[in-house]
Amino acid sequence: MVPLGHYLILSAILFGVGTMGVFLRRNVITVLLSIEVMLNAVNLAFIAFGRTMGSVDGQVIMFFVVTVAAAEAAVGLALVIALFRHRESLNPDTFTSLKW
Amino acid sequence: MIPLYIAQFGIILAVFGMLLLAAAVMVYSERKVAALIQQRYGPYLVGPKGMLQPIADVVKLIFKESLRPVAADRVIFVLAPILSATAAFAAFAVVPFGAETTLFGLIEEPIRLQVADVNVAVLVVFAITSISVYGIVLAGWSSNSKYSLLGSLRSASQMISYELSYGMSLAAVLVLAGSLSLTDIVNAQQGAWLGFIPRWFVFVQPLGFLIFMIAGVAETNRAPFDFPEAEQELVAGYHTEYSSTPFMMFFLAEYINMVTAAAVAADLFLGGWHGPFLPEYLGWIWFLVKISAILFFYIWMRWTLPRLRYDQLMQFGWKVLLPLAALNLIVTAAGVIYCGN
Amino acid sequence: MGTELLLFYLFGAIAVAASLLVVLQRNPMHSVLLLIVSFCALAGLYIGLEAPFAAVVQIIIYTGAIMVLFLFVVMLLNAHREDEVDVGARPVRGPLRAGAVLAVVLMAELVWALVRAGGPRDGALSEGAGADAAALQSVRTLGNVLFTDYSLAFEATSILIIVAMVGAVVLAKRES
Amino acid sequence: MLLLIPLLPFLGFLINLTLGKRLAKSASGGVACLAMFGAFLVSAWSVWSLIQMPPAERGVVLEVAPWIESGTLSIPFALRLDPLGALMILVVTGIGFLIHVYSTAYMHEERDSEYARYFSYLNLFAAFMLVLVLGASFPVMFVGWEGVGLCSYLLIGFWFTKKSASDAGKKAFIVNRIGDFGFLLGMFVVWTQFGSLDFQQVAHLAGQMPAEAAFGTISLATLLLFVGATGKSAQIPLHVWLPDAMEGPTPVSALIHAATMVTAGVYMIGRNAVLFGHAPETLAIVAAVGVATALMAGTIGLVQNDIKRVLAYSTVSQLGLMFVAMGVGAFAAGIFHLYTHAFFKALLFLGSGAVIHALAGEQDIRRMGGLRKQLPVTYWTFLIGALAISGVPLLSGFFSKDEILWKAFSGGHTLVWGVAVVASLLTAIYMFRLVFLTFHGERAPVQDHARRSPGSSDPGNHHSHLHDAPPAMAIVLILLAIGSVFAGYIGVPAVIGGSNRIEHFLAPSFAAPGVEVSGEGGASPAEARGEMSPASEPTGEGGDHRAELLLMAFSSGIAIAGIGIAVFFFLRRRDAADRVAASFAGLHRLLLNKYYVDEIYDAAIVQPIARTSDRALWRVVDAGLIDGTVNGAGSFVNGASAILRRLQTGSMRAYALSVFVGVVLILGYYVWR
């Protein structure tokens, strides 16, 4: 029987890793991936809590998170493509101008 | 207790071997059938009626030199075939192919003829299929050749598009059976209506079955949906750059996928191992029969129908198959609620 | 040290390692694959948490759909490597490095907070085990909760998906 | 009912304003005339109903709506009709109507839109004038006061494409502003003194107190009001605008700058008779200014060559005469003269208009002459007007002017009387100079460059032959001629068997309410002036009868003499006139240049103001201070944002970082707490 604390600490670590990625990588796609990592960390925490409470709400919320993640990925990637057409680059720091 | 573990292990080995064997048989029969359809002889030199042809092929492939393009992505190039092969094998793990049996009394309490009895088996199959996409995609991308890339892109988009219809037609059956466990689904098809019509879901879900078959063909990248390896257009598609053992793995994976798809179809729609005239413990024979029938159907289709155009494929998948599947699901659900069972 | 704990450490290690690699190496393609690995590891953890359905969904949706989408984009833009030459990019690397450091700090804070709150040794999960696992595992209960208590949220997400879909199409369409 | 009187013209104005552009000439003109005629009928009816009442309580008050309510100050928008107002509205609406009719013909060459614009202004003027006349309190009157000022500006500058016209308009407006300022101050003083602005109440309160021996508050108030009057009625020192106002269309000059508006000052003093009566100092000043103006304008009029300017100066001098009447406390006489003057001066202006019309805009009398034949109607009517204004016996001018002279004399202001006599002599002379030069003798050939007002020039025929006034004009001229012959007979003085009806009629308006009005003629002003000069307790004793008759004869003699002189110089021996002019070259130039008043004003006031506003106000205050502050604010924001912009890197990850820092800090706080 694995204690709740384990899962929470794991999810904290994953979350930190994801955040790190957001700041370290200079490729929009990778940044999005890092965000996915963060989302999954959160999912893990949810499910662990749900398990502890003995309710399925954790899983339900996890589904919603997944849905949102899917939407986010779709739109985000569409944006990436559009951006790539304008600037031949994927570096988020090249997209600093507020309009073109 | 010990014998039980032994039995389990045995089953795993048996399944593994059976899949390899099935692949070999498929290769042979495919060639034969094709030849017959085209009024040729087909393989007949190696062994009696060329039955050992597949083995010859394997040997040849193994002894070939394994090439790798310079610009290829080393890791992924190696990884891709392994991945697809693994996925192919893994998918079958949750497919039951026979009733509970004591293996002729070798062990006391009966075990199920199935590697792993997961209560969400259907979804597992589904999930693994979705993973098997990566084998192809990565192969195409890593070998860094435009043909491969195009092939992999095509296969990926195609498989994703048809996965939806696949899942929906499957969901209809789940609704009918009221369970995600393949075993339960199979058992739900026991017996017969009016004594002679077997309670197979195919009779309840004709449309569902049709969609499932078509989507299955698309999922396994077989003609008329064999775009990833459309010889006439892109040399050999995603495995253009592959040779020797890696190529063999793709080959293997393709046929095993076919078998798996056929097995799942049999379990979902054709009542699995249930059938007249045979005792429960010989149900696996029925199972084999049904699978072979479906597989023959695959081969038959491949050598009969021409390949579609890519846009036609997509149009069909999104604009015809998906709506139909959705409709089917809705109607089924409504029916289930109405009949209240 | 039961098998469960063993599995937990195994999958946890895989997940963390994979995620770290996702973040730390440059090739986006590899990042995607490694992320898939970490997702699979998480799926394993979910099974350990008696949420097999969640695990399967994790694989089907994340691995089978979202990641394929990423893969597509990576292939489409053929971004083999992170472009070192910043095309007219503002050099804001320094502060961003600081952000990475901050992430580590956050990690430390969280862990510390958890440890102080009873940490790994508390048997929090065990009394949760009292709840019958069957109920948690059964897809039926899940469906009931999803379509009764969370029906509104469910509908909302469906709308969200539609909007996202349309938006993606509009954005990615090459304006002619 | 009372409200209808100003409202009808206002409606006409609205109609012509809104859809006048689309209306045909006949339509817009018709609307305007109809509005005026309606107003005339209504006012006639209300005057009739007023006359039915017993003399004591003749007065109808109509409170239209509450207007200004603030603390103790409460001014309803009220109209009041009393004998004085009755006379005025009859003049305004009656003559106004006639002039509208005249205008339909006179302005006929205008484009439709211009035509409509003209009539809308005219109607608006009428409306405001009626408000001015009927207003029951200072503020209401002030509304009308300002309104007519505006309309006069608009109409003087009607042909605004012509610089001289627009300049004249501006001049008139600005000069009037000065007067209005005085008027306002006067109002304030009255308010502080009496705590009310309603004419009746003010008069009542003033009636209680004795006349001021020395210069006091009332004197101040009245003096300030009088400044306003000088502005409107073109008295020294604010007379300069009226002659230039002749740039406007002739009917406008007739209506606004002869018959109605310019007399507003006189009317205002009459309206506040009681107040002025209590301020002998002011009255003296009024008289002095009036007589000075009369003389000065007369002398200038003697040498001017522009037909309309001559008339303008005569107007100024006549107004001066009216102020003389006011000054000597003969309010009734002043109003009476105002009333008769309205007739013949309108007639004269319209006559000159007819001449100008016939000569396609020629206004210089030296280029005229011998028009008697071609323009018989104009000639005769003009002649009648001239006779009336010069005070030839048995014509309207005679009675009113003689009344004033007699009141002045009997009031003991002999000096004033003397100057007034000279002024009226001059009047006779320059009027007939005008008549002779215009209609008799030989006509100088018309040069085309001499076409003045673009308004009255029609491209059709270049007046190879002259045509007399068209019917619309002719009828109006004749009607006015009749008027100026007989208008005076409502005020035939007692001595020659008449019973000065007008004076009795007006008496209540000049008396403080509550003070018993004796039916006797001339008594009321005396009483209103509160026993200021016992010598003006006249009529009734035999001795004064003789004196009055004597004076009457004398003044009529003066008139005849004036005409005679005119005959000698300008009909028989023109060269003599030129010789006289040559021999007094300096004086002649002085008169010709109107005593250089304009030049003096320009040098003393206009230039300094212009210079200061250019050097100090514009360059320093506006450009320096105001623009400086505004631009300073702008540039400050600019600079600040230039600094703040650094935060807006646009790099999403920088933003994310800022958020993240916050998260870490907050969490850290809770962890280490």
Image (spheres, coloured by chain):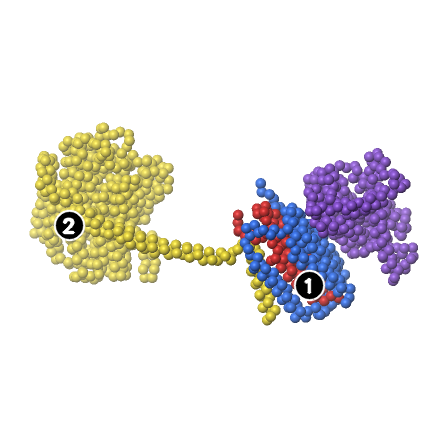
Chain colours: A red, B purple, C blue, D yellow
Q: Amino acid at mark 1?
A: Leu
- The quarter holding residue B158 reads top right
Report x, y in % for residue B28. Answer: 84, 42
Q: Is residue C2 left or right of residue D338?
A: right
Report x, y in % for residue C50. Answer: 74, 61
> Which residue carries the number 2 mark?
D292
Q: Is residue D467 above or below residue B165?
A: above
Q: Is residue C122 above or below residue D16?
A: below
Report x, y in % for residue D83. Answer: 23, 50
Nearest to viewer (mark 2 / mark 1) = 1
**Which residue: 58% across, 51% down?**
C85
Separation of residues labelled 2 and 1 (CA atoms): 110 Å
Res. D188 visible in picture: yes
**Which residue: 74% across, 50% down?**
B78
Query: Can you name the residue that lies furthest to the top here?
Result: D464
Q: Is residue D356 left or right of residue B254?
A: left
Res. D152 visible in picture: no
Q: Amino acid at mark 2?
A: Ala
Q: For numbered disc 1, what is the local secondary structure?
A: helix
Q: Residues within 10 Å of mark 2 (few under 14, many from 20)?
A: many
> Which residue carries the number 1 mark?
A10
